[in-house]
Image (cartoon, rainbow, N blue to C red):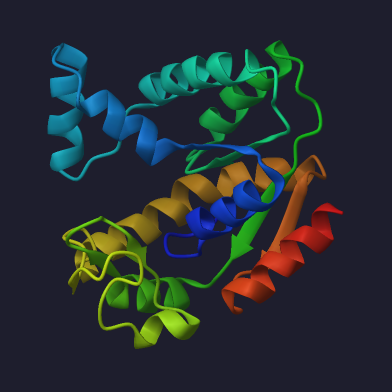
Amino acid sequence: MGRSGCGKGTQAKLLRNEFKFKHANSGDLIRTKMKEKNFFGRKLKKVINQGNLAPTFLISQLWTEKIKEIKAKSDLKGLIVDGSPRTLMEAKLMDEVFDWVEWTKIKVILLDISDKEAFSRLTKRRICQDCGRLIPWVGQFKDLKKCDKCGGQLMTRPDDKPEAIRSRLDFYNKEVEPAIGYYRKQGRLIRVNGQQSIEDVYQEIKKALS
């Protein structure tokens, strides 16, 4: 968990690659649903394109189906979730699902960065026009002129305009913070300083989990 731009996706991929964990991301689930040629797919696409969030009931449904799919895998070594929960209600609903599938060793990692740091990163980060790779504004990535994966041109994401970023940060402070408080009270929250290099953040996460 953490503010937009804190590096959730980057750290999740590092853990996935080293420990062979499964990785589930809210954004991926939503984008897949949006492609469906039915009422729900069309309605979700309309809602997202207007800059609004997917409703809690739909997010809960998508996560439940994804966890059912992952639970059935015989080679499961662990699961990393990023992009959810977004609210206190979603945190409680996810706990119900985890309880139902009898997953008990759950840790919550908060990649903690300030509003100021998040705003700075989001207004400067770029995305590859060709492969869609998101280039964070940290460390060596600041010096990239082209995509380090495919060599494509880099551009600013359409939803990384200042007013849209402020709206996302306001949502975090109003809705996500209560979910973080919920985990903190349970003693399940691991706070990691997200205002470090990618490698230093990763090493701190591994140290905390060990």
Asked if residue 20 is positioned above or below residue 136 in the image, the reply reads above
At a point 67% along the width and 65% down the height, the residue shown is 202
Asked if residue 190 is positioned above or below residue 20 in the image, the reply reads below
In the picture as drawn, the residue positioned furthest to the right comes out as 210
At a point 59% along the width and 42% down the height, the residue shown is 179
Asked if residue 56 is positioned above or below residue 19 in the image, the reply reads above
> Is 122 situated left or right of 6 in this image?
left
> Is 60 situated left or right of 22 in this image?
left
Query: From this viewpoint, is residue 1 visible?
Result: no
Count of numbered badges drawn on the protein:
0
Q: Position of residue 73 (x, y in %)?
A: 63, 18
Q: Quadrant of residue 54?
A: top left
Asked if residue 195 is positioned above or below residue 6 in the image, the reply reads below
Q: Position of residue 85 (x, y in %)?
A: 52, 37
At a point 64% along the width and 56% down the height, the residue shown is 110
Q: Position of residue 104 (x, y in %)?
A: 80, 26
Q: Quadrant of residue 188?
A: top right
At a point 23% along the width and 70% down the height, the residue shown is 162
